[in-house]
Image: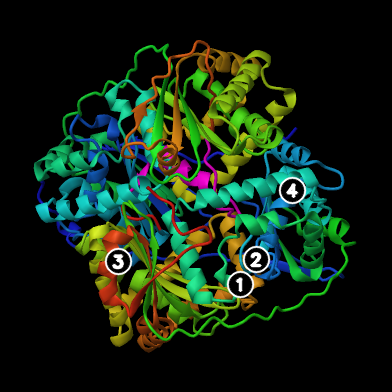
Amino acid sequence: MSTVTLPQAPIELYTLGNGLRVVLSEDHSVPVVSVAVYYDVGSRNEREGRTGFAHLFEHMMFQGSENVPKAGHFQYVFNNGGTMNGTTSSERTNYFETLPSSQLPLALWLESDRMRSLKVTQENLDNQREAVKEEKRLSYDNRPYSNAFLRLNELVYQNPRNAHSTIGSMEDLDAATVEDVQRFFRTYYAPNNAVLTVCGDFDSEEARALVEKYFASIPSQPSPPAVDVSEPEEVAARSEIYRDPFAQLPAIMLGWKVPARRTPDFYALSLGSDLLLDGDSSRLYQRLVKDEESVVGIQGGMGERRGPSTLYVFAIPKPGHTTEAIRATIQEEVKRLGTEGPTPEEMEKLRNTLLNDAVRSRQSTLFRAQRLAEYTLYDGDPHPFNTELERYLAVTPERIREAVSRYLLTDNHSVMEVVPAHAADAAEEAPAPAEPEPSGEPAQPGAPPPQVPAPPPTEPAPPTEPAQAPAETAAALQQEQASPTNE
Amino acid sequence: MTDTEEFRRQPPAPLPARPLNLPEPAETTLANGLRVVVVEQRRLPLVSFRLAFRSGDSSDPQDLPGLTDLMTDMLVEGTESRTSRQIAEEVARYGATLTAGASSDYLTVAASSLAAYADEVLELLADVTLRPVFPENELALAKANAQQNLIAQRAQPSFLAGEAVARVLFGQHPYAVVASTPESIEALAREQLVRHHRRLLVPNNAVLLVVGDVERGHVVEQVERLFGGWARGEVSEPQFPAPPERTERVAYLVDRPGSAQTNILVANTAIKRTDPDYFPVLVMHTILGGNASARLFMNLREEKGYTYGAYTQLDARHLAGSFRATTEVRGEVTGASLKEIFYELDRVRDEDVSGKELSDAKTYLTGIFPIRLETQEGLVDQLVQMRVHDLAPDYLQTYRENIQRVSKEDVRRAAQRNITPDRAAVVVVGDGAQIRGQVAPYVARVEEFVGARGGAAGA
């Protein structure tokens, strides 16, 4: 067994007078620096009639501030040799850039200017509304399976805060006004509602002085209203059929509501999901793809949230195999794991994979900046970046068995059957496509589904790139909208 | 808003630049011709391996498209001493990765792990490379799945656009083929995979890159032990028909009824990777469409709001290349978007770029260069490109100078040679009824393009 331990990142956490939490992490391997700013606002904060607003707002953050013109943010970063982006999820909105280390002042200047003085005009709002609508068409409406997955999420969650998508609806995007944007800015884009991280090749003393210079005078604001993301206890299974206008092959999607991130049950379930779904050695891959030859591919994972999280599975059946039979096999494998628990070989695999992923992901300054910001925003403490791996490694086989049994062998799950609309039309002369319709399938006791994916570390792009149709949906499943660019 | 301090009015001056220490690869060649490149990097306890062969999908026999892809995919599906499942489980037990994949010019077998398992993982990499057996049952499964994946891909408009543009630009050249067909996959037999493997995967056609927390002498020793007995083979530079000469601007419409957007690709053939004009073309591409501050993006998205993104792609491969402008727009503005694209393509040919655009593009390219070298994966990518395309041994050392040397005149020449709007192939994938009439005014004629499986399927 390996004796590798996780190299610890240096971490300095402090808070400015205005409430901005700052994390610095020095590392001199490569002369680059990554800066990330995380705001505690995501689609969970959106009110009814304004779905998609947090993400639309994120686009507005690139439309200029007092001293930076429209699109100036892109230009300053790129034209000084850097890369940047912003993304929105249910949990938060983030902005980040990686630049030659000499350009740290530029990154802080840019981020501080929009935090203190965002400019919003009707013209820019209209322009970005169009860009976001095109993003929605590109990532969801013109693509197979993506909207079906968004619909699955609406079945999994009962609380509208959790259920609606980050991209939102066209109607709600249309309804957004300049006043909405200004109010949202005042409410959520305050230093006391944000975390700033700086990682890479810099000098901490110098960085502290620069952070003070650019951010200290930005006034704090009253705390934003709290969000209730709690979900009712659940016993009913839900299912629907989605007629997909673009899918060529049918698909089955399953979703479970599971406990929040950083809870013992979440850790155990996350590892259980790895055993079922992660990679070619996983139980479901070996059973469904290799033994039964009943699916073209299967993937899944944890939708990690601060509140109730999800575990989802997505599979494309082969001709001649029913989604019912595939569900039954998945259920059988979940039950086996929930009854017998993992083998010693599987525990060794989990351990080494966790270690390799954790070490490998740390190569990137941007990854470190993002993770440190996330922990600080969600947990008030960046140190789990160094220590959370231990929590995963400490999970016993018995805990995995228990968690799988308790959360996955229940009716508390949702099923989405995707039917290619063209096939369905041919078969039954059906009405217009695209709208999901309830299948009326009754909840089955002790029914099917599965479970989960990836743990704490994320992993770098794979070395070789076999492009597969199912993989395309993985991004959609994470529901993270990237703002400026998808290069 | 608070009163604005004076220092906020202008972007701040940079701090002093910090040095970039470029890695120093050490290269050895075994007696059988296998080149071994090792970069010792002690920063983190990790190792990355990549074995690259200078043959890819272009090596498919004319009558057997898809052979190289399938053969490569099958490497990890069984060896003389391990079943597919044993390979998967062993890799997982080390927490490692082991993958094989082919592109048009080369194929790679890649592995990565904690440095503690470097020897074990290298042994696995050697086993799947040297002793795959292509079991009949695994082959039948891989073929069935590949056929289904081909069907699934056709749901993606970006796939349909890529398929069409390759076909019309490259004609009889192997780069014309983006994906195989279910029928041609059906025709592939085990014996063909075995022969193709024997022919392509020879040591004198390969380079093994190793980056990580390893000791070079030890790695070379292991490589010698595992790969030393591998027999040389014949390596031939294949000869292919040149891409067809284009004489007019034609649109190729892939009808996808109900499409929520139009995917637009305006393309022409361009330099290959080893062309001496590579750096001027790269700078030109950066100014025109290389990122979210380039001309196309600023015009089509930030000014017009037609799209989420608009970019150019420089696809300079080993034997030929192409240059493409690409965007996805709502159907109503398909014609208006073509107008803006051609405006930008003409402008970069007809006028010098500004001094600021030139220096911004250079700063961008030289600035992001070290970001790519942050990770082992990024460094290995660079080292592979250098070897498969025979780039200069000091390519990494001179990269930034080569960028700095590019002049306005170079950029203009690069645009004129590599962008030919009057002979462009204009691929549009979208709702035919909605867009056909919008496209027509911008081209000599509109041809309906039917892909390998009857064009697009859609709503």
Marks 3, 4 in one chain: yes
Does residue B373 appear to the left or right of B14 in the view shown?
right
Give, as a single range, the part of the protein colored magenta: A456-482
Residue beneath disc 2: B57
Reading the image, the residue beneath label 3 is B436
Q: Nearer the viewer, mark 1 or mark 3?
A: 3
Label 3 and label 2: CA atoms lie apart by: 34 Å
Residue under label 1, please give it: B174
Question: Does label 2 lie on the same chain as label 3?
Answer: yes
> Is A423 one of the magenta-colored residues?
no
In contact (CB < 8 Å): disc 1 and disc 3: no
User: In the image, what residue type sits under mark 4?
Assistant: Leu
Residue B252 location, quadrant: bottom left
Respond whether the residues carrying marks 2 and 4 are from the same subunit.
Answer: yes
Residue position for label 4? B139
Q: Quadrant of the N terminus of chain A?
A: top right
Give the camera-side residue of B151 and B88: B151
Q: Earlier in the sequence, mark 4 or mark 1?
A: 4
Q: Residue at x 78, y 75 (%)?
A: B235
Q: Does the image show residue A479? A: no
> Under tag 1, what secondary structure?
helix
Q: CA distance from mark 2 to mark 4?
A: 18 Å
Hey, what amino acid is under mark 3? Arg
Q: Position of residue A44 (x, y in %)?
A: 29, 30
Please give left or right for residue A293 compared with residue B82 in the image: left
Mark 2 and mark 1 in contact? Answer it, CB < 8 Å: yes
Instruction: Answer above or below: position of A212 versus B105.
Output: above
Quarter of the rendering containing residue B39 = bottom right
